[in-house]
Amino acid sequence: MRRDINIIMKISIIVPVYNAEKTIEYCIDSIITQKTKFEIELILVEDYSTDRSYEICLALKKKYTEIKLYRTNGKGVSAARNTGLSHSTGDVVGFCDSDDIYEKDVFEKVRLFFENKDIDIVIGGFYYSKKDSLNTVVQETHSHNRQGHLLYNKILNDGRILGSVCNKFYRAESIRDFSFLTELEYCEDLVFNAELVEKNNLKAVIVGYPIYHYIINEESATNNKDRLFTNDSRLKYIVALERLLGEASDRKYKAFTEYKIVTLALDFLFHDYVDGERKSNLKEAVDKYKWGFLNTIIVNLPFGGLKWLVKGFIVSIRGLRGN
């Protein structure tokens, strides 16, 4: 594919692939067709799919010189991303899921931000749509810089930012010593981002337009409610966040993490399918981390803090009534 000859940087896009035969070509097309001065390195990591994903990836590798193809052995998305990171050679790194796409020509916008050597992460808005629908809702923010505690809190608690790595691009040298925790089944993206920001005090620019398009797969594991809980009825999201809490270096980071745990617990307590020991464990988490939640409620008012305070009050009233 022809590109502008004035290439000044390389971008590595890592795409884990598992049972994606219906979507992978669409995903790759959104990457290969970007008009940009970036040199593109597209790293596909196929995780021993049970469909034709690997054969399709092989054919695409022959078609596009930008593609590198590796395989993991059914180890999951975190291991696939780690494999991609270990083989990446770009100055900037991005992650794309195999059933999603990038918006048109966003790489060049991102490249211009990374010309500023002080910027470590570029965070963009995103679209959500169901697999068979073109109706979209954009989650936007305004362009501004954040770092330290403020960035950490936004990654955990601002729904317009998301904990995901897919609506973000990273300066490669900033994430070179980091990897995804393969033992986590959920929230591995959020833990990766939060630890990255906490330990390195990185600066991010948050842009006010969509760069990524999530295609919602209602058959995915995230939508299988029973798989969200461990065998001892603990919410896996909270298990991951408690690990992050244990690594937090100071009280502010801990409090923002506790706020996230409480809001997750409150959210699930209002689902009809949560009962018995699951409900008891969620209520226990609310009680255990309530002080961190209350201490950060003011700063999180723009992110729905008042709504969560009301829900917490309702849960406490129900508890007093024995419900």
Image: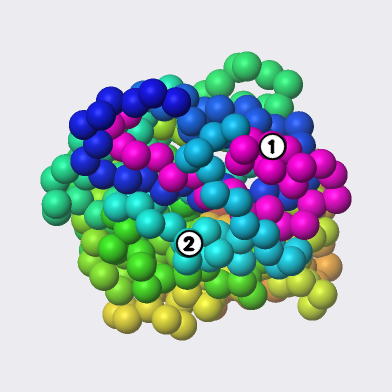
Residue sitting at x 67%, y 59%: 71
Residue 140 in the image: x percent, y percent? 38, 31
Q: Is residue 96 magenta?
A: no
At 75% from the left and 64% from the top, the residue drawn is: 74
Instruction: Compare residues 188 and 306 and report the one nearer the observer.
Output: 188
Residue 194 location in percent, x, y?
40, 64
Give, as a single range, the part of the protein colored magenta. 36-62
Q: Quadrant of the C terminus?
A: bottom right
**Mark 2 → mark 1, Cα distance in angstroms:** 20 Å
Residue 298 visible in the snapshot: no
* Front-lying residue, 257 or 47: 47
Q: Is residue 41 magenta?
A: yes
Identify the image quadrant of residue 107: top left
Image x and y of residue 193, in percent: 41, 61
Q: Residues within 10 Å of mark 1 (few under 14, many from 20)?
A: few
Q: Which mark is residue 59?
A: 1
Q: Is there any visible trace of residue 90 in the rendered image?
A: yes
Q: Quadrant of residue 36?
A: top left
The coloring applied to the image is: rainbow
Q: Is residue 64 above or below residue 153?
A: above
**Residue identified by numbered label 2:** 87
Residue found at x 29% / y 63%: 174
**In the displayed structure image, the side of residue 16 where residue 261 appears, left or right:** left
Q: Is residue 145 above or below residue 276?
A: above
Disc 2 residue crowd, few under 14, some 14–19, many 20+, Cα 10 Å: few
